[in-house]
Amino acid sequence: MIHYTGINHLAMATGDMDRTVRFWRDLLEMRMVAGLGKPGYRTYFLEISATDMISFFEWPNVEPLPEKDHGYPVTGPFVFDHLSIGVRELEDVWTLKDRLEAAGFWVSEVVDHGFIHSVYSFDPNGIPIELSWSVPDVDLRAHPVLVDSHPSPVTLEGPGPQQGVWPRVDSPTPREERRVYPGEGTELTAGTKRNWFEDTP
């Protein structure tokens, strides 16, 4: 069984990194923990929690998405609906609602979903976000629930991974053949480039 630790990072795109950093770091108070770049390319990482980050690529011709209501069905090619980020206290939901409104961003009323209370908004790139507080004593991870009126046979197999569905790995990569290749980001730890955060308070 594979043991997941959370979302290491969810990579999004922006055409305006400064406005994006202002929103996520300064308005939502997510600490920027890494940034790298060169002409025509940047990627910055912001900390959501001890195990989860969001990152943004800045590409010159990226335009904000047209706003689409969270959870509203669409047709045609589509991948991503919205990003829900948890907060520790219900008071945090109200604080974020007030901050978003004060900064001129549209934000929904607080919505009770039974297991979470949420507000919805959009970041400067048009990315639909939800900020959610988990209702105490309602733990869907500990007690999964399926109340679909027409569940498919696949979902009725249960909440856990089903064995034998995919081909078995008969030839795992031998340890002596395992290679890890350098990619973007190695300069964050190599000590070969100036760390601007060491020079600023």
Image: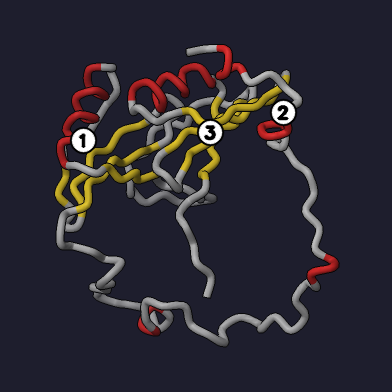
Binning the other alpha carbons within 10 Å of mark 1 as few (below 14), some (14 to 19) or many (20 upward) gives some
Earlier-in-chain disc, 3 versus 2: 3
Residue 150 versus residue 121 in the image, above or below: below
Rounded to the nearest whole Å, what is the CA distance between mark 1 and mark 3?
22 Å
Residue 49 versus residue 157 in the image, above or below: above
Q: How is the image coloured?
A: secondary structure
The answer to whether 11 appears left or right of 141 in the picture is right
Mark 2 residue type: Gly
Closest to the observer: 62 or 167? 167
Q: Quarter-wise, where is residue 92 in the image?
A: top left
Q: Position of residue 14 (x, y in %)?
A: 54, 27
Residue 148 in view, yes or no: no
Res. 92 mark: 1
Res. 141 mark: none
The residue identified by callout 3 is: 45
Mark 1 residue type: Asp
Q: Nearer the viewer, mark 1 or mark 2?
A: 2
Q: Position of residue 135 (x, y in %)?
A: 17, 54
The answer to whether 146 appears left or right of 66 in the picture is left
Q: Quarter-wise, where is residue 196 in the image?
A: top right
Residue 54 versus residue 7 in the image, above or below: above
Residue 120 in view, yes or no: yes
Q: Nearer the viewer, mark 3 or mark 2?
A: 2
Earlier-in-chain disc, 1 versus 2: 1
User: Circle 1 sits in a helix, a strand or a loop, which is it?
Assistant: helix
Binning the other alpha carbons within 10 Å of mark 3 as few (below 14), some (14 to 19) or many (20 upward) gives many
Res. 191 mark: 2
